[in-house]
Image (cartoon, helix red, strand yellow):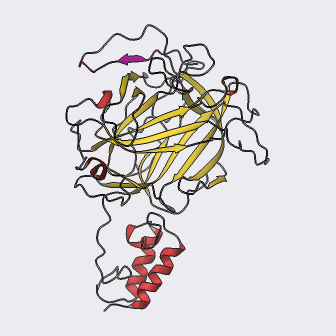
Amino acid sequence: MSTATTLRIALATGLAQPALAQDTTPRFTRGVPVAQIHVNLATGERTIRPWNSQPRSGSPPVWINDNTDPCLTGITIGFVDEADTDGDGIGDIFGGACDATFPCEGNWTNFWADLHDPDTVIDRVHFMYGTGVPDVDLDSDGVGDGVPGLTLYLNFADHDDGFGAHVPGYERQCIIELEITDLPGDLGNLPPGFGAVYELVIDLAKDSPSLVFELGDSDGIDDAGTGYSGGAIYGEPTYVDLDSNGHHDFSWGVRFDQSAIPQAQRGFVGFVSSADKYGNPGDTPPHPADAIGLFDSADNYANGPSCPPDHLADYIGTFFFAGFTCYPGSEVPFLSTHLELYGHPGPVPPHPGCNPADCAEPLGVLDFPDVIAFLTAYGNQGVYADIAEPIGSLDFADVIAFLTYFGQGCP
């Protein structure tokens, strides 16, 4: 258990307030990886895959914060639940319905960071969570069948550099909110004190309606093509660099809800704690999508932030979690979540040739260099190979489309 004390800071008036008198120490729980779950929010499809499966073919990563707790060994993973200050056996942040007071079960925990490129289109999200909510396995696949009422809400916003994002004229601008219901739980076959850890692979690009969204819109154009863009929702470009570090400021909010589950059947649940990505530990060479702009703190909100646009949600305060210590029995986790965003940076450039198959010099002529260029782009997950629906996913349909365009020739 963690012994560090979190610090609440209220900045609505611009002045730091004293820390809460009650203990709001986060609980740090060990978890055992169970499975990777691919979710298509448009169709409701769920596919169970082994832990650490390769992702489906599609866009490359554009922002990743995927390091795991450096203090743990073997197959265990650390995840964060909030302190149980009301004594109901459930962490106060991720327990259930929110009553707009602190501590408040069901609050939003909001993380902020910096985006590498403006006008970034996101078509797939990876998120990891741990849980001790009891579940069953009626189909004997080793994975919880899903707990009715156990829900994850995950949203993304522009114009957010933390501390409530209360900057006049630059309030946080929520773009999209994802809801994943009936999350798999814990089958009760783990050692005491351990929880089940799952990785959600949330597919936004396939089928209709698409939930592909854009972060850091710089020109008022909806590059996602779905309406989920700051320019589309707010009617203006949303690219802003509040901390003046040369990168766009964005955030994501996490909320777990157990309010629909009978009290006796609830359990601990939280987000997987990622190690600090500054310095890219374990990455040699560093990956260009590595997370930037993170530090060990997060905002908490009650009654929001929700989407569509909610500029100023009910801001509770910003909490610092004091960094990482590996002292046995007193682990203090990084607050950063395991989150991976996939897509393409910047708007897809207009195709240079006479049709989508004309992707190599000399332009205006379809020949063998175009075949080589397409195959190279396809192998590198390049945008010029993504020429067939669903856009954002490279598959055999793109190959067929290329052959069709190639056969048509140039005018």
Does the magenta portion include 5?
yes
Side of 356 where 70 appears, left or right = right
Q: Which residue is located at x 67 percent, y 27 percent?
A: 262
Residue 308 horizontal/vertical position (percent)? 37, 43
Residue 270 horizontal/vertical position (percent)? 56, 31
Q: Which residue is located at x 38 percent, y 67 percent?
A: 383
Side of 353 where 282 appears, left or right = right
- Would you say residue 70 is visible in this rendering? no
Is 277 above or below relative to 17? Answer: below
Looking at this view, is 261 or 53 the one in front?
261
The residues colored magenta run 3-13
Q: Specify the farthest residue to the top.
A: 21
The quarter of the image holding the C terminus is: bottom left
Q: Which residue is located at x 43 percent, y 41 percent?
A: 155
Dominant secondary structure of the residues highlighted in magenta in the image: loop
The quarter of the image holding the N terminus is: top right
Looking at this view, is 212 or 188 the one in front?
212
| Quarter-of-image position of residue 407 | bottom left
Residue 84 horizontal/vertical position (percent)? 57, 17
Number of numbered discs present?
A: 0
Does the magenta portion include 89?
no
- Would you say residue 301 is visible in this rendering? yes
Side of 14 where 18 appears, left or right = right
Residue 128 horizontal/vertical position (percent)? 55, 41
